[in-house]
Image (spheres, grey):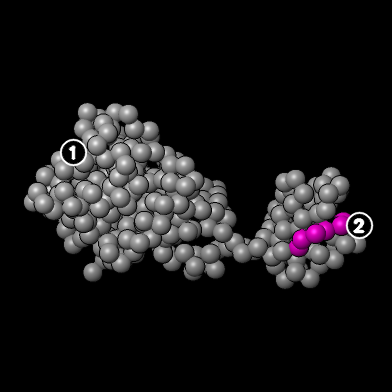
Amino acid sequence: MSAIRTEQLQKVYGDVRALDGLTFSVEPGTVFGFLGPNGAGKTTTIRLLTGLAHPSGGKAWVAGEDITNSRKVAARIGFLPEEPAFYTWMTPLEFLDHVGRLFGLPGHERTARAEDLLEQVGLTSVRKRRIAGFSRGMRQRLALAQALINRPEVLFLDEPVSALDPAGRKEVLEMITRLRGECTVFMSTHILDDAQRVCDTVGIIDHGRLIVEAQQADLRARYGVPAFELECVDGYEEALRSWAEAQAKLPWVDSATCDGGVARILANDVKIAQQSLLARAVEDGLVLKRYEVVTPSLEDVFLRLVGEEGAQA
């Protein structure tokens, strides 16, 4: 049984169709990355799946419960919204105790669970300080702790690391990785590097429709185009830029960009590029210190698919 399953899920606001027949499934115990540009329907989807909004059409199930049974769904999930809210006069310990009471946890379990989660998110030293004085990053960490207080079967994360510094992002992503197998994680994010790092499966949405859903490795193998990167020695930057502009006019080149001393070439015929690109650079007098065929990233795939879908819409 899927941890999350939707069938033709729809949401309409007046003349705006926020979701347009969304169908996908998420396997139990996996980390699912839900990607899309701003306004694609990511947050709307999460609101429907968590019972915070009602669908205009279609069906969905979370942890085996129909989403129309919002009370049953709420008992089995955790949720970290993009902009979490708190009772700021409380301390983290008091706030987590309050959330634990809402889930019906007994007193000794609430205390132990709160202390454990605060240690996991790095807030043990401030557990008795009022939340009012917390930075945005500290509040984001506390919000993640409250989302886990009831040991949810399915954890929904809406932009979970957007407010964190690099060290905080690393810690939270490692925590999400450790949750694999313990619960199902549904993570909406616009930081594609983070999705590439932790997600098993990825779904890409645009204009309320699912473009693709696949395991990350399969997605990159199916849609990714390898990039050819050439880095010149100091003093050849302008020559490299002019050279890249010339390559962009070749029929077998999709695009050619140059940033500083690094040129990046995307080819529509990889075989020709492999045979002739380096030779062309040498013949044209470029002095290189690096030539590399770069494996396509999740960002490369995302931009390609969203761009193609947008052109067709």
Amino acid type for the residue under numbered disc 1: Glu
The residue under the point 32% across, 61% down is 179
- Where residue 25 is drawn, which disc sits there? none
Q: Nearer the viewer, residue 290 or 203?
A: 290
Residue 55, percent from left and from top: 23, 46
Decide whether residue 287 is among the magenta residues: yes
Q: Does residue 303 sit above or below 91 in this rendering? A: below
Task: Report the residue that reaches farthest toward the front.
Answer: 125
Q: Which residue is mark 2?
A: 285
Q: Which residue is mark 1?
A: 94
Number of on-image labels = 2
Query: Which quarter of the rendered picture does the N terminus lie within?
Result: bottom left
Q: Sort mark 2 into few (<14), some (14-19) or many (20+) by Cα contacts within 10 Å.
A: few
Q: Does residue 197 sit above or below 123 in this rendering? A: below
| Quarter location, residue 47 | top left
- Secondary structure at badge 1 equals helix
Q: Nearer the viewer, residue 150 or 204?
A: 150
Disc 2 or disc 1, which is closer to the eye?
1
Instruction: Specify the principal SS of the magenta part.
Output: strand
Q: Which residues are magenta?
A: 286-291
- Secondary structure at badge 2 equals loop
Decide whether residue 205 is among the magenta residues: no
Q: Is residue 69 found left or right of 285 in the rendered image?
A: left
Residue 129 seen by the camera: yes
The residue under the point 29% across, 28% down is 132
Work out whether mark 2 precedes mark 1 in sequence or the reverse, and give the earlier one.
Answer: 1
Q: Nearer the viewer, residue 311 or 94?
A: 94
The residue under the point 32% across, 29% down is 133
| Quarter location, residue 213 | bottom left
